[in-house]
Image: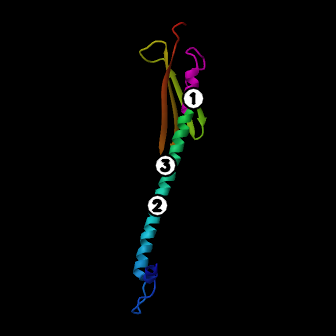
Amino acid sequence: MNRLFKIFSNKSNGESSGFTLVEVLLALGILCFSVLALSRMQATSIKTGHTAWKFTKAANLAAGQMEYLTSLSYDSPALVSGSQKHPPYELTWEVSKTGTMQNIKYIRVTASWKAKKHTHNYILSSHVGKSAGK
């Protein structure tokens, strides 16, 4: 313990101990550089989190619509193509009989939104088949 106090106290030959101005400025420079790097990393983390939130919202909208469409029967009049707006998202779905298999309707649900210069799309696809007994 006594040794610790000697490090910060005056030297025995009369010279004062401590840090020079250059050492202090160098330490402050390193500290500032570190804080700037951490703040940039934090900003990137916030931006990435917001993008992930938008993708999750689009996935939930598309999944909800797909759930509704696949719950309908093959002959339901509601099982047709359409679209809805959920600002800033646009939800579109296409129902078609195209394909090699008979008695199957293919469903494609797209949730799209614009972010700055880019348009993002989240796409789900599935099908509804006609029951064999009908």
Q: Answer yes or no: is residue 92 visible.
A: yes
Outermost front residue: 1
Mark 2 or mark 3, whichever is nearer to me = 2
Residue 53 lies, in percent from the top left, at: 54, 44
**What residue sits right under mark 1 in the picture?**
65
Q: Which mark is residue 38?
A: 2
Residue 77 lies, in percent from the top left, at: 60, 17
Q: Quadrant of residue 81?
A: top right
- What residue range appears in magenta? 62-81
Q: Residues within 10 Å of mark 2 (few under 14, many from 20)?
A: few
Q: Which mark is residue 116?
A: none
- Is 47 or 31 nearer to us in this picture? 31
Q: Earlier in the sequence, mark 3 or mark 1?
A: 3
Q: Residues within 10 Å of mark 1 (few under 14, many from 20)?
A: many
Q: Earlier in the sequence, mark 2 or mark 1?
A: 2
- Is 109 or 32 nearer to us in this picture? 32
Residue 5 lies, in percent from the top left, at: 46, 81
Q: Earlier in the sequence, mark 2 or mark 3?
A: 2
Residue drawn 57% across the image and 14% down it:
75
Q: Which element type, helix, strand or loop, lies under badge 1?
A: helix
**What residue sits right under mark 3 in the picture?**
48
Q: Which amino acid type is marked by label 2? A: Leu
Outermost bottom residue: 14
Q: Answer yes or no: is residue 82 visible.
A: no
Q: Are marks 3 and 1 in contact (CB under 8 Å)?
A: no
Q: CA distance from mark 2 to mark 1?
A: 41 Å
Q: CA distance from mark 2 to mark 3?
A: 15 Å
Q: Using the image, determine if residue 129 lies above or below residue 49.
A: above
